[in-house]
Image (cartoon, rainbow, N blue to C red):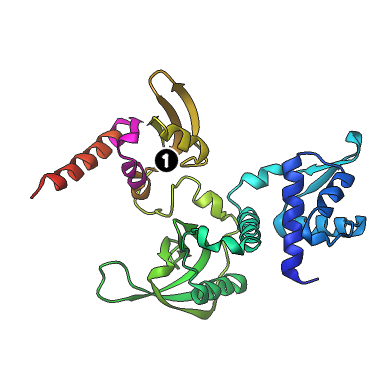
Amino acid sequence: MKTPALFKEYIWLVNTIHSAKRISFAEINEKWLRTEMSEGISLSRTTFNRHKDAIEDIFGIYIDCDRKDDYRYFIGNEEVLHEDSVQNWMLSTLTVNNLISESMSLQNRIVLENIPSNGELLERVLRAMNEGKKVTVRYRRYQATESRLFSLAPYCIKLFRQRWYLLGRFGDGGFAIFSFDRMEDIVISEESFKMDPDFDASEFFGECYGVVIGDGSQPVRVVIRAFGVERYYLRDLPLHHTQKEIQASDEQDYADFELFIRPTTDFKGQLLSRGACLKIMEPQWLADEIRQWHEDSAKIYQEK
């Protein structure tokens, strides 16, 4: 069987078990027979076990069986389906891809966001990361008249707001972020590097909102008040993994959320973009800064 078809079956199996919470093999097979993939042929135990093993290897998703509950299957580590991991991103992307590919007759009614792939440069960086090689990046910053060359160790890549970013480490130990859409070229060096064994990409960005890392901000407790429907948006799409709701008032139409985060410029920009829908309650210096930004914005519209 071709790889795309196998992936389609893996995704179907994960989504079927996850949706059911707990499901027997007979129930899985019953649902399987109702799909076009089955071609009317039952799912064998051997195929099911192979799929189960492949899903664990590829996506890190463990399908367990509860023998005390009539041998029902369930996702043994469901938390991975809610993490910002590569496996979860792959699963979500492939799931959507499968759904859209089965609905090509609706292509004129499906509107997607463009995410530049920067395929060739991305491939070079990934190859250098796999081989443990340094890279030389020709990079031109916004408003710069000329590009510059940077020699660095490619530590990790991150996707943020439809753009790919490279986190590079210099010889002196310092880190810097480079956006792929401002890279003019990447050359893989013959010089090898050794990753810091204690480096963890998720932990490195854990206190940040996006990709700004070098503006000197320190993590602080931030309390945000969301008004009207904005509180529902924040409940469904938290600004940060540390976000939690601490109080709400339906009468006064607001909810307060607490975050422990570095108030970097990209985080402040996100707060500013929500206008009167959000108010910073703590810390006061951050509330004063956001208020000043709003006042400066208002002055621009007052000018003729």
- Residue 299 drawn at (x, y percent): 14, 44
- Residue 18 drawn at (x, y percent): 73, 44
Q: Is residue 122 magenta?
A: no
The residues colored magenta run: 269-286
- In this rendering, would 196 be left or right of 232? right
For the point 51% across and 52% down, the residue is 204
For the point 82% across and 45% down, the residue is 64
Q: In this view, does 280 lie above or below 62?
A: above
For the point 46% across and 42% down, the residue is 239
- In this rendering, would 204 be left or right of 252? right
- Residue with the mark numbered 1: 219
Q: Residue furthest front?
A: 105
- Viewer can see residue 70: yes
- Residue 66 drawn at (x, y percent): 87, 39
- 134 or 304, nearer to the observer: 304
Magenta segment main secondary structure: helix
Q: Which residue lies furthest to the top in this view?
A: 251
- 212 or 19, nearer to the observer: 19
Q: In which quarter of the image is residue 97?
A: bottom right
Quadrant of the drawing holding the N terminus: bottom right
- 239 or 5, nearer to the observer: 5
Instruction: Identify residue type, mark 1.
Output: Pro
- Residue 218 drawn at (x, y percent): 39, 42
For the point 77% across and 43% down, the residue is 76
Q: Is residue 302 above or below residue 111?
A: above
- In this rendering, would 110 be left or right of 78? left
Q: Does the magenta stretch include residue 271?
A: yes
Label 1 residue SS: loop
Q: In this view, does 250 lie above or below 168?
A: above
